[in-house]
Amino acid sequence: MIVKTTIQGLVTAVKGLSLTIAHLFAARKVRKELDIKNDDYFQDQGGITTVQFPKEKMPIPEVARYQLDVEIDDCIVCDLCAKACPVDCIAIEAIKSPEAIGKTSDGSVKRLYAAQFDIDMAKCMYCGLCTVVCPTECITMTDQYDRSSFNLADLTYTFADMTAEEIELRKKEWTTHQAAKEAAKKQ
């Protein structure tokens, strides 16, 4: 019994060492860079595969999902992206406007101000659901994948560009408009 176990141990050790030695000699050649669109991208697995980041970068697929970006000028503040997010990493605060405040690049009318539009990329699970539901396609996933930070607060990106004074002014405009509407109803 002891002899059989010893032989199995030696055979296993020889198999492991032979695999290690094979990889050691294969590491002498450098794996050539292939585009990820090539059909044989995953076939050539020999050679060193370490990428010397940031000098070298791996090719990125066109449909990759990495960092979220918002074109706030195209946002109609509909809040669909925040509702679709399964981890609640999108925080939006909208302020109503008495009249239309402009148009987006696709012709949609903007009637809400974005007082807050924050995305916490530390919570984001990169599912892309927020980009699918956006009617104006203002929220997209970019090909940037190398945003790192030692502070979690740095991973919350703010896209709204309103100051605190502007927010207060817009809120007062809306309450004044609503009060005028109520006064007109009572007359």
Image (cartoon, rainbow, N blue to C red):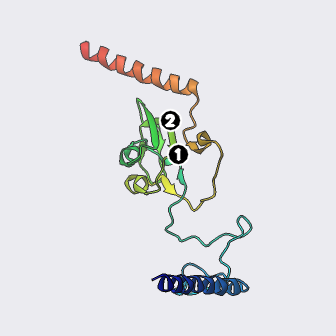
Disc nearer the start of the sequence (1/2): 1
Residue 122 appearing in the image: yes
Farthest top residue in view: 187
Q: Position of residue 33 (x, y in %)?
A: 66, 81
Q: Is residue 101 above or below residue 176?
A: below
Q: Which residue is mark 2?
A: 116
- Residue at the spot x=48%, y=52% of the render? 139
Q: Which residue shows up at 68% across the image and 79% down it? A: 48
**Image quarter for residue 35?**
bottom right
Q: Which mark is residue 73?
A: 1
Which quadrant: the N terminus? Answer: bottom left
Q: Residue at x 45, y 38 (%)?
A: 92
Front-most of residues 88 and 1: 1
Q: Residue at x 49, y 46 (%)?
A: 123
**35 or 20, which lies in front?**
20
In the foreground, 35 or 111: 35
Q: Position of residue 10 (x, y in %)?
A: 57, 84
Above or below, 11 relative to 111: below
Kind of residue sitting beneath label 2: Gln
- Report whether 173 appears left or right of 182: right
